[in-house]
């Protein structure tokens, strides 16, 4: 009766160990829906990996991971002098590593919490958050001699996902750190979205820095063969052309079956985020989907008899109705069908680790 993520436990754990072994200084990232696994499970797995620090997306995610992971907690969302950042339980303050992306916030954090630990985030080509080269020099002046001692934990870089190497940009930003006088002994660079080869080259070219790769997708979802998502067939109804069904009273386009399966909008099914793919192929696919939508047919992520089937109507909160044309193998109630999902946007009823 559920939308279920089944995980080949041995294979998944082997993959996690391989990534941790290949990436010294690993900082596992657990944020949002926990990449489909849930934040609590990922916090326990980060502890199992033996890392000293894990990263969360927001301050509101801290309670779910802090009791399950005993080490440091890096918050990726920049600290601001308002909101959830000011409501963190006092017992967590010594474990937190804040991200600071504005000089005025650095001043405010030091005034409010003189002992707070933090990283300074630099502005990358993403243009999301971060200090410019000028800001970095001003931040160094604010920190003064010693640059905050052990409270200053290094530099954070959040790089784009776009294809191509980002090493040239990283080298430029590291030069700005050196120019600002913030490159002390083993200054840490907390960096995301570099390949294994790029990280190895960065460690070689900047051996005097400590490289801390923040990794989420590659770690938790890097071996897709260990993961399977299935939905339960809840009901099957034979229909003839013109038969009316569903919330919206749609008519069957031809004879076949309406198959009701678990999984709907409450799980993230049918809710699509932009992919960012601007290739000609991607644009053609978008046009094709739009054409199907215009005549009432939208391809679902559910696979029956080897094909992704069409939604019979828009998905419901916890179930979806699919149209199966005559001639296709008709599943029985209770059968499991495969589902193709975006893990970071899907909430599962059950996560089963074998």
Image (tube, grey):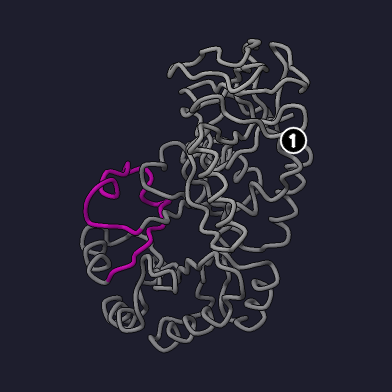
What's the residue at 38%, 65% (across, down)?
A: 128
SS at mark 1 in the image: helix
The residue nearer to you, when weighing 273 against 101, is: 273
Indicate yes or no whether the magenta region holds residue 89.
yes
The residue nearer to you, when weighing 209 against 162, is: 162
The residue nearer to you, when weighing 11 against 154, is: 11
- In the shown orientation, is residue 78 left or right of residue 46? left
Q: In which quadrant of the rendered view does residue 5 lie?
A: top right
* Looking at the image, residue 349 lies above or below residue 194: above
Q: In which quadrant of the rendered view does residue 153 lie?
A: bottom left
- In the shown orientation, is residue 151 left or right of residue 289? left
Magenta part of the chain: 78-102
What's the residue at 43%, 73% (across, down)?
A: 124
Indicate yes or no whether the magenta region holds residue 311.
no
What's the residue at 67%, 81% (across, down)?
A: 204
Q: Quadrant of the image for the N terminus?
A: top right
Give residue 201's position: percent from left, percent from top: 67, 78
Give residue 264's position: percent from left, percent from top: 51, 26
Q: Quadrant of the image for the C terminus?
A: top right
- Label 1: how many residues lie within 10 Å, few (<14), some (14-19) or many (20+)? some
Give residue 233's position: percent from left, percent from top: 66, 17
* Looking at the image, residue 7 lies above or below residue 106: above
Count of number-bearing discs: 1
Which residue sits furthest bottom? 179
Give residue 155's position: percent from left, percent from top: 45, 71
Q: Which residue is mark 1?
A: 9
């Amino acid at each position: 009766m559920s939308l279920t993520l089944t995980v080949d436990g041995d294979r998944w754990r082997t993959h996690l160990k391989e990534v941790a072994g290949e990436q010294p200084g690993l900082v596992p990232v657990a944020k949002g829906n926990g990449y489909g696994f849930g934040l609590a499970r990922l916090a326990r797995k980060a502890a199992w990996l033996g890392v000293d620090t894990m990263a969360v997306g927001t301050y509101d995610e801290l309670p779910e991971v802090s009791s399950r992971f005993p080490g440091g907690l890096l918050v990726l969302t920049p600290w601001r002098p308002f909101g959830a950042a000011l409501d963190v339980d006092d017992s967590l303050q010594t474990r937190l590593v804040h991200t600071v992306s504005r000089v005025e916030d650095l001043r405010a954090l030091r005034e409010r919490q003189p002992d707070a630990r933090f990283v300074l985030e630099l502005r990358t080509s993403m243009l999301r958050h971060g200090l410019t080269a000028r800001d970095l020099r001003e931040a160094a002046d604010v920190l003064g001699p010693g640059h905050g001692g052990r409270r200053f934990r290094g530099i954070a870089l959040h790089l784009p996902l776009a294809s191509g190497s980002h090493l040239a940009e990283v080298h430029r930003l590291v030069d700005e750190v050196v120019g600002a006088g913030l490159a002390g002994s083993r200054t840490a660079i907390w960096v995301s979205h570099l390949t294994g080869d790029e990280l190895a080259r960065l460690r070689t070219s900047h051996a005097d820095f400590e490289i801390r790769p923040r990794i989420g997708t590659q770690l938790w979802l890097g071996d897709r063969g260990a993961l399977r998502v299935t939905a339960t067939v809840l009901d099957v109804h034979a229909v003839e052309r013109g038969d009316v069904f569903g919330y919206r009273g749609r008519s069957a386009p031809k004879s076949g079956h309406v198959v009701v399966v678990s999984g709907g909008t409450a799980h993230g099914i049918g809710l699509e985020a932009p992919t960012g793919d601007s290739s000609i192929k991607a644009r053609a696919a978008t046009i094709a989907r739009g054409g199907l939508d215009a005549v009432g047919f939208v391809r679902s992520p559910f696979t029956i008899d080897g094909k992704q089937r069409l939604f019979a109507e828009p998905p419901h909160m916890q179930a979806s109705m699919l149209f199966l044309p005559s001639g296709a193998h008709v599943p029985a109630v209770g059968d499991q069908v495969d589902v193709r999902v975006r893990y970071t946007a899907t909430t599962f009823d059950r996560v089963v680790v074998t």
